[in-house]
Amino acid sequence: MKLISFLHQGQATYGAVTGQDQVIHLGAHLGAQAPDLQSLLAQYMLAQAQALAASEAPTLTLAELELLPVIPNPGKIICVGLNYHDHVRETGRELTESPALFVRVANSQVAHGQAIVRPRESHRLDYEGEIAVIIGQGGRRISEAQSWQHIAGYSCYNDGSIRDWQVATTQWTAGKNFWRTGGFGPWMVTADEIAPDQLMTLTTRLNGQVMQQATTAMLIHSIPRLISYISTVMPLESGDVIVTGTPGGVGNKRNPQVFMKPGDVVDIEIDAVGVLRNTVCDD
């Protein structure tokens, strides 16, 4: 099942995408109990959503909707740095035994089809294609063996980065949290559609040119390892998002360097999920 968040008559809601572009408005049926996707996951209502998606007729089309980031209101967005060998090499950094973690805030994100915003303060706006994992059942100190049971689904993510602000200090928070620089979407594919340890291919295209490509087999710290490690530090909760890292090929490390500019189109594709597409505009 593909689940989206969107605006309908000025209100944030959610639904299931069926066929090419038909949408079943799940929020119209379940909103009293679960007004958004985060609360749907927190109430363990995915099975009810699936039953409705199988029985209800679509009333909306994808083309007419203004999408929101898949989980508009996550409790936390935990991002993983330096999680592919080729990206570690191109940055000249040391491989660490434990995952390198940082946090994004929700309003640093945009949805599929919206413009990523290049700020006035810097033109060094870089792409980072990544696989996002959305937590279903929360927990603390989750074992790697049990981690798959805690995944609600997967989505595409562009961890857009303002490079000079990112490297200005030893901490990356500033460069990773400029307003509306990260893309999240277009939807969440539920975990029952993607088998545990299924090989997924991640591709980033800038104006149609492939800039990054990798598979989940190339992750330094696997998805189960990330869930186990992060949940040791803090309890994971329903709707939390883990952004699993970007492969080599970022624009900042190319020769010559490539940064996103107004008018560009950037696609993040995961073969088992779909394509996140954003344009770029100036603030």
Image: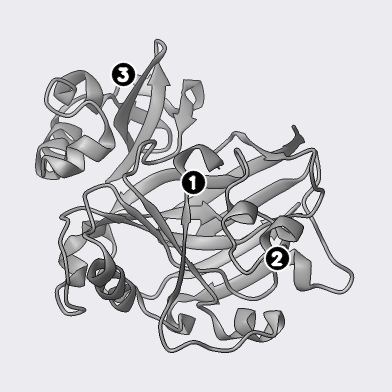
Residue 163 in view in this figure: yes
- Secondary element under disc 3, as helix, strand or loop, is loop
Image check: 158 left or right of 208? left
**Among the 4 quarters of the image, the one containing residue 41:** top left
**Among the 4 quarters of the image, the one containing residue 164:** bottom right
Above or below residue 136? Residue 253 is: below
**Number of numbered discs present?**
3
Residue tagged 3? 59
Q: Which residue shows up at 77% across the image and 45% down it?
A: 264
| Between marks 3 and 2 in the image, the one whose residue lies nearer the viewer | 2
Residue tagged 2? 167
Residue 26 coordinates in the image, percent (x, y): 23, 27
The answer to whether the residues at label 1 and label 3 have Cβ atoms under 8 Å apart is: no
- Secondary element under disc 2, as helix, strand or loop, is loop
Residue 225 coordinates in the image, percent (x, y): 31, 78
- Looking at the rendered image, the quarter that the C terminus falls into is top right
Q: What's the mark number on residue 184?
A: 1
Q: Amino acid at mark 1?
A: Phe
Q: CA distance from mark 1 to mark 2?
A: 23 Å
| Between marks 1 and 2 in the image, the one whose residue lies nearer the viewer | 2
Q: Residue furthest top?
A: 9
What crowding class fits label 2: few (fewer than 14 Cα within 10 Å), some (14-19), or many (20 or more)?
few
Q: CA distance from mark 3 to mark 2?
A: 47 Å
| Between marks 1 and 3 in the image, the one whose residue lies nearer the viewer | 1
Q: Which residue shows up at 32% across the image and 40% down it?
A: 3
